[in-house]
Amino acid sequence: MAAKTKTAPKKTKTVGIRPLGERLLVKRMEAETTSAGGIILPESAKEKPKEGKIIALGDGKLLENGERATWSVKKGDRVLFTSYGGTEVKFNGEEYLIMEERDILGVIEG
């Protein structure tokens, strides 16, 4: 009879930034490099996407009764956010946004 071997659980890669309270960490999607007509866009003409992926969530909003509110989004969700939502941060050569849940306009499904 062959001996069963246990495999170590997969560790999820952490970014090194943990948002606090009702904030979340979002990785903005890459900007389009070509226009709808096929023209290659220079860096200065690219519009920053208002779409991203949630990387981490804080503990949630602290309610008056001392409990934490539940999130409407979860880690890994692709979301649309407001144009000026969040604060841009650069960490280990990567750019992220730290924003509040109210800056999220919707979750992209599928």
Image: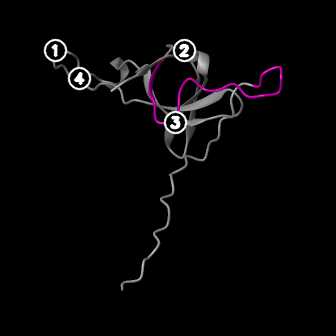
For the point 23% across and 17% down, which residue is it?
Answer: 35
Our reading of the magenta stretch's main secondary structure is loop
SS at mark 2?
loop
For the point 36% across and 86% down, which residue is it?
Answer: 1
Report the Cα–Cα distance between label 1 and label 4: 8 Å
SS at mark 1?
loop
Name the residue type under label 2: Tyr
Residue assigned mark 3: 75
SS at mark 3?
loop
View extreme (right): residue? 65
Front one among 10 and 67:
67
The magenta stretch spans which residues?
62-80
Question: Contact, CB < 8 Å: mark 3 with mark 2?
Answer: no
Position of 15 with respect to 62 (left or right) is left
Q: Which comes before the other along the chain, label 1 or label 2?
A: 1
Report the Cα–Cα distance between label 4 and label 2: 23 Å
Name the residue type under label 4: Thr
Residue assigned mark 1: 37
SS at mark 4?
loop
Residue assigned mark 2: 84
Residue assigned mark 4: 34
Q: Which comes before the other along the chain, label 1 or label 3?
A: 1
Please say if 93 is above or below 100.
below
Front one among 83 and 105:
105
Q: Which comes before the other along the chain, label 4 or label 2?
A: 4
Report the Cα–Cα distance between label 1 and label 2: 27 Å
Q: Which comes before the other along the chain, label 4 or label 3?
A: 4
In x, y percent, where is residue 73?
Answer: 53, 26
Q: Is residue 49 magenta?
A: no
Q: Are there few (<14), some (14-19), or many (20+) residues within 10 Å of tag 4?
A: few
